[in-house]
Image (spheres, grey):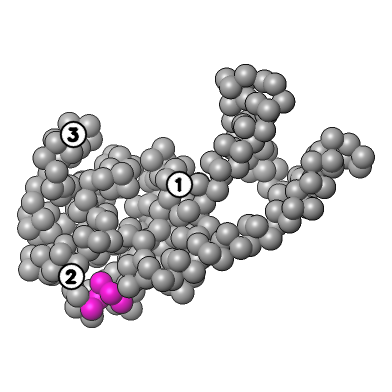
């Protein structure tokens, strides 16, 4: 594969996850302000590190993996050093393509992404949308880059708040379910280690089954739920407590907050 010079600005949790995934296929350089973190990135991933000016000038693709609150200062400095018209990819929640284009110039090719936590082990999913000046080839390149840390979907930017609510925040919902299930299992008398093992393998096995069978979750749920059985007894409790409505309200709240935080 032809290598493209990728500059990653920010080597925190998501920045390092991206570096970990793409470094085997692409030439990567990282800009990280924290000295200890910078040294760790260099040792751990065997990548070049440098100042923002150096990374900006040498990179054909710049991935902005800094916190939303640091975005303004980074964009202001970045504009001083941009050479040509590199592709700028943002992984910051709530930062719109228009926001970046306004600060770097309307002709800047901008791609906005929303990865999630499982990107750290190459099992994430990343929502991708394009700014006004971005070309089809830019979207394809972004897909190739983020396929190194999981799967990708391409959506119109108006749906990015929904992507944030669903997959960006989604791992927390899964962990909450597992946390609650473990507590419930412990309440039946099993010790912590057994409760954790039962829940983890049940969730993992269920996901693997759904992926292999390629059947809808509702179909598989019905298959487990025998009339008059133990599963139905549990399902009736979930239904009485309107678990479906809880999910609708929770994701609506997350989507609303994502919209409120958008710039």
Q: Is residue 81 visible?
A: yes
For residue 95, what is the image quadrant? bottom left
- Checking the image for residue 85, the label placed there is 2
State how far apart marks 3 and 2 are (Cα). Answer: 30 Å
Q: Is residue 42 above or below residue 221?
A: above
What residue sits right under mark 1 in the picture?
A: 124
User: Would residue 189 be found to the left or right of residue 235 on screen?
Assistant: left
User: Would residue 130 be found to the left or right of residue 206 on screen?
Assistant: left
Boundaries of the magenta span: 98-102
Q: Nearer the viewer, residue 51 or 256?
A: 256
Circles 1 and 2 in contact, beta carbons < 8 Å = no
Please rate how many residues cluster around mark 2, counting C-alpha atoms within 10 Å: few if below 14, some from 14 to 19, many from 20: few
Image depth: mark 3 or mark 2 in front? 3
Q: Earlier in the sequence, mark 1 or mark 2?
A: 2
Residue located 21% across and 60% down the image: 70
For residue 98, what is the image quadrant? bottom left
- Checking the image for residue 262, the label placed there is none
């Amino acid at each position: 594969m032809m290598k493209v010079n990728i500059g990653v600005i920010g080597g925190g949790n998501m920045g390092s996850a991206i570096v970990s995934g793409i470094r085997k296929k692409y030439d990567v350089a990282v800009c990280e302000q924290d000295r200890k973190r910078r040294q760790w990135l260099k040792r751990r991933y065997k990548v070049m590190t440098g100042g923002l000016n150096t990374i900006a000038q040498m990179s054909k693709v710049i991935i902005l993996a800094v916190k939303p609150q640091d975005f303004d200062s980074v964009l202001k400095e970045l504009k001083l050093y941009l050479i040509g018209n590199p592709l700028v990819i943002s992984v910051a929640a709530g930062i719109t393509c228009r926001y970046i284009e306004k600060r770097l110039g309307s002709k800047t090719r901008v791609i906005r992404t929303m990865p999630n936590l499982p990107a750290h082990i190459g099992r994430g999913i990343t929502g991708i949308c394009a700014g006004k000046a971005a070309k089809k080839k830019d979207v394809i390149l972004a897909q190739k880059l983020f396929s190194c840390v999981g799967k990708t979907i391409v959506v119109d930017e108006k749906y990015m708040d929904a992507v944030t609510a669903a997959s960006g925040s989604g791992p927390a919902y899964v962990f909450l379910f597992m946390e609650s299930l473990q507590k419930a299992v412990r309440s039946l008398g099993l010790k912590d280690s057994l409760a954790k093992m039962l829940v983890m393998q049940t969730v993992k096995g269920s996901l693997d089954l759904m992926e292999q069978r390629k059947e809808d979750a509702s179909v598989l749920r019905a298959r487990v739920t025998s009339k008059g059985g133990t599963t139905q007894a549990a399902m009736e409790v979930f239904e009485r407590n309107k678990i479906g409505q809880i999910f609708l309200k929770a994701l609506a709240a997350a989507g609303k907050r994502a919209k409120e935080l958008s710039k």
